[in-house]
Image (tube, grey):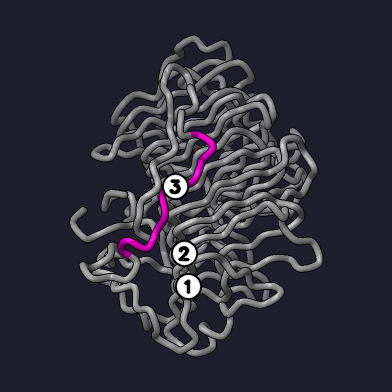
């Protein structure tokens, strides 16, 4: 992952959707039939499709919807400002969404700068992207998203459309995708300051790689949450201080196919401490999830890889080469193998505080476990001589080594590396 991917930079009670649609016909840049309308980028709401042009700033003042059978492409450098604190916009995706940022020209989807205060550390200022079963493709590349996760009401579009949990009072994830026959690609994105989960997937072929997550979860919730109906590769993600677990895998819902995820070379730091009640901390497994885990670096998390012992993971799951570090003895004690904490093969694990220092380039390992704010000066690469270098394995299968074709482009899950964690040797 490049430096811009791991540093988050500058990244609203819902009204009735019918009312918004009635007023949006004069303000939408794209009409519901996909034809170009007179573009007014200062007050966007209602139906959207077509192309949002490179470098343009779009001020969103109401709920948005990509209609079924249509697509919206967002080009590099586009800034989307969710600017209505009363409506708190939701972005409904019934069609296809292609956010095609680049490393040098990422897409930004956030709230006005003046709203980005410590009072809103966990966002809650706009909703999120909520897809329907009719959404075939969502591709998000180099997108910086922040300050969402607002709660639904009975008048929210997602509730009226029966999407996500479809009840009032539920906070939305940054990105929700449910189509078991569809495709979700999320690569080189940042998710920061969200009240709920960052990514929640209820179905589909999925690659989630090289992303950075921080300040995720107010009173609860996880970084990346995968359910039944999902086949996924999840790799090289950096997750800092999730409220509960960095990664949650559950076959809940019983959709076909059974959840199967290959999860490798991820780094999770300070996971689980902010949740008032004890549950997860790093990786949580339950309800027959089939999960193969390799080369993951767990630093100062509340627990090691943890199962619901009353409703455990699929017995075919594999656990290899996990590297554990705990600054204090409580943390170390919490990741020792038990009937709840999973023991893997070739794990690097000690039983004393401070054992197995991963030798990060620039991160104080004594940082408060409850801190959720990612300092952009921190560098989680490994220094020469780190015991995490050369401690990974590469001879395992992943789901999408041959790639997934989407809209003329093939997206491939990244090759595993022989180091542990999301970042290799410094300056590499």
| Residue 350 in the image, given as x and y percentages of width and height | 46, 82
Mark 1 and mark 2: span between their CA atoms?
7 Å
Q: Is residue 104 above or below residue 75?
A: below
What residue lies at 46% left-to-right and 89% top-to-bottom? 352
Q: Is residue 76 visible?
A: yes
Residue matched to label 1 = 270
- The region drawn magenta spans 389-400
Q: Quick one: label 1, few (<14), some, or many (20+) residues within 10 Å? A: many
Task: Say whether residue 39 is magenta.
Answer: no
Judging by the rendered image, the residue that carries numbered circle 3 is 395
Residue lying at 51% horizontally and 27% vertically, measured from the top left: 97
Q: Give x and y (percent) for residue 397.
A: 51, 42
Vertical arrangement, residue 151 with respect to residue 129, above or below: below
Residue on which disc 2 sits: 268
- Asked if the magenta segment contains residue 391, the reply would be yes
Q: Is residue 124 left or right of residue 325?
A: right
Picture quarter containing residue 74? top left
Whether residue 126 is visible here, answered yes or no, is: no
Gap between marks 3 and 1 measured at Cα:
29 Å
Q: Nearer the viewer, residue 359 or 7?
A: 359
Q: In screen coordinates, is 344 left or right of 80?
A: right
Residue in the picture at 56% in, 43% down: 175
Position of 122 relative to 74 (above/below): below
Q: Nearer the viewer, mark 3 or mark 1?
A: 3
- Cβ–Cβ below 8 Å for labels 3 and 1? no
Circle 1: element type: loop
Label annotation for residue 236:
none
Helix or strand or loop: what does disc 3 sit on?
loop
> Among all residues in the image, which is located at the extreme left?
427
Q: Nearer the viewer, residue 289 or 409?
A: 289
Depth order, front residue of 204/31: 204
What secondary structure prevails in the magenta region?
loop
């Amino acid at each position: 992952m490049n430096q811009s991917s791991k540093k988050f930079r500058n990244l609203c009670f819902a009204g009735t959707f019918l009312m918004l649609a009635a007023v949006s016909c004069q303000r939408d840049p794209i009409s519901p039939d996909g034809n170009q309308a007179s573009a007014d980028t200062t007050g966007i709401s209602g139906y959207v499709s077509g192309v949002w042009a490179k470098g343009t700033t779009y001020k969103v003042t109401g709920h948005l919807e990509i209609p079924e059978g249509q697509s919206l492409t967002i080009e590099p450098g586009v800034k989307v400002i969710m600017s209505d604190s009363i409506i708190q916009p939701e972005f409904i995706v019934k069609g296809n969404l292609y956010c095609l940022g680049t490393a040098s020209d990422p897409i930004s989807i956030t709230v006005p700068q003046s709203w980005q205060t410590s009072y809103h550390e966990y966002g809650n200022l706009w909703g999120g992207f909520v897809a329907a079963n009719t959404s075939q493709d969502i591709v998000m590349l180099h997108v910086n998203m922040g300050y969402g996760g607002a709660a639904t009401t009975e008048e929210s579009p997602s509730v009226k459309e029966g999407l996500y949990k479809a009840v009032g009072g539920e906070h939305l994830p940054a990105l929700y995708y449910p189509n078991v026959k569809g495709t979700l690609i999320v690569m080189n994105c940042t998710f920061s300051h969200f009240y709920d989960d960052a990514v929640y997937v209820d179905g589909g072929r999925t690659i989630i790689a090289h992303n950075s997550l921080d300040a995720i979860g107010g009173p609860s919730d996880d970084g990346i949450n995968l359910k039944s109906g999902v086949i996924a590769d999840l790799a090289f993600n950096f997750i800092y201080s999730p409220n509960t677990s960095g990664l949650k895998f559950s076959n809940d819902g019983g959709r076909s196919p059974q959840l199967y995820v290959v999860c490798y070379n991820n780094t999770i730091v300070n996971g689980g401490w902010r949740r008032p009640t004890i549950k997860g901390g790093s990786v949580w497994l339950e309800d027959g999830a089939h999960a193969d885990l390799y080369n993951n670096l767990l630093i100062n998390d509340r627990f090691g890889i943890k199962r619901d012992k009353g409703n455990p993971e699929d017995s075919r799951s594999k656990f290899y080469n996990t590297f554990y570090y705990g600054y204090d003895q409580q943390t170390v004690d919490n990741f020792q193998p038990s009937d709840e904490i999973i023991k893997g093969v070739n794990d690097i694990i000690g039983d004393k505080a401070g054992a197995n220092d991963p030798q990060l380039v620039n991160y104080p390992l004594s940082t408060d476990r409850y801190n959720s704010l990612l300092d952009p000066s921190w560098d989680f690469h490994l220094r020469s001589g780190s015991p995490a270098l050369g401690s990974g394995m590469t001879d395992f299968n992943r789901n999408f080594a041959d790639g997934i074709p989407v809209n003329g482009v093939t997206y491939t899950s990244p090759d595993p590396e022989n180091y542990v964690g999301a970042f290799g040797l410094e300056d590499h």
